[in-house]
Image (tube, rainbow, N blue to C red):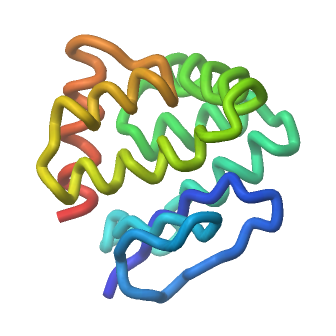
Amino acid sequence: MGKVLQFSLDSRRRRSVGTEAGVADRGDPVVIPLLRDRQQAPTFSTFVEQIETQSLATSGETLAYLLGVSQAEGVRCALTFMQRWRNDPELQAKARAIYEGIKANKANDTLMLLAICFGLQGSLAINVLRHLETQVS
């Protein structure tokens, strides 16, 4: 199996590197296959660690890479995520549902979650969805 994305907002940052891709139990990271041809690709776990340390520029750069958007858009999405995470304790479950939506081919649900988690809308959200679909398949 190739590299994996991990997404966990749990402050304990449990990890599942090298496990089968799939939906983890509540509180565990979501594991998403990532760019199988890159050795040092950043992960969603990296992004979350950067958010937790308030590293907006760095987390934006990481998110830009993960979502396939410009660096400026990545920073905007990271800021949106950071602000919403402070106010929404269920954001982790919503982020986990992005993966579930992609695996279940529920494009509309996934687009709605991209808007909730990252503020992505319109054609940009569709482009991100397509990018993530290529990473999961």
Give the vertical position of 53 relative to 84 (above or below).
below
> Could you tell whether 121 is left or right of 19 in the image?
left
| Rendered image quadrant of residue 125 | top left
Q: Count numbered badges in the picture.
A: 0
Residue at 81 percent of width and 67 percent of height: 12
Q: Position of residue 24 (x, y in %)?
A: 48, 72
Q: Quadrant of the N terminus?
A: bottom left
Q: Which residue is pictured at 55% across the width and 58% down the height?
A: 7
Q: Is residue 52 left or right of residue 2?
A: right
Residue 36: percent from the left, percent from the top? Answer: 31, 73
Most distant residue in the right direction: 53
Q: Which residue shows up at 23% across the image and 50% down it?
A: 102
Left or right: residue 20 compared with residue 136: right
Residue at coordinates 39% horizontally, 30% vertically from top-left? Answer: 114
Looking at this view, name the residue that lies furthest to the top: 122
In terms of image quadrants, where is residue 111? top left
Q: From the top left corner, tell me how far across and down residue 136 is, in percent.
A: 25, 61
- Compared across the picture, whether 49 is left or right of 98 comes to right
Note whether 33 is above or below 132 in the view shown.
below
Above-or-below relation of 49 to 77: below
Position in image of residue 28 (x %, y %): 60, 70
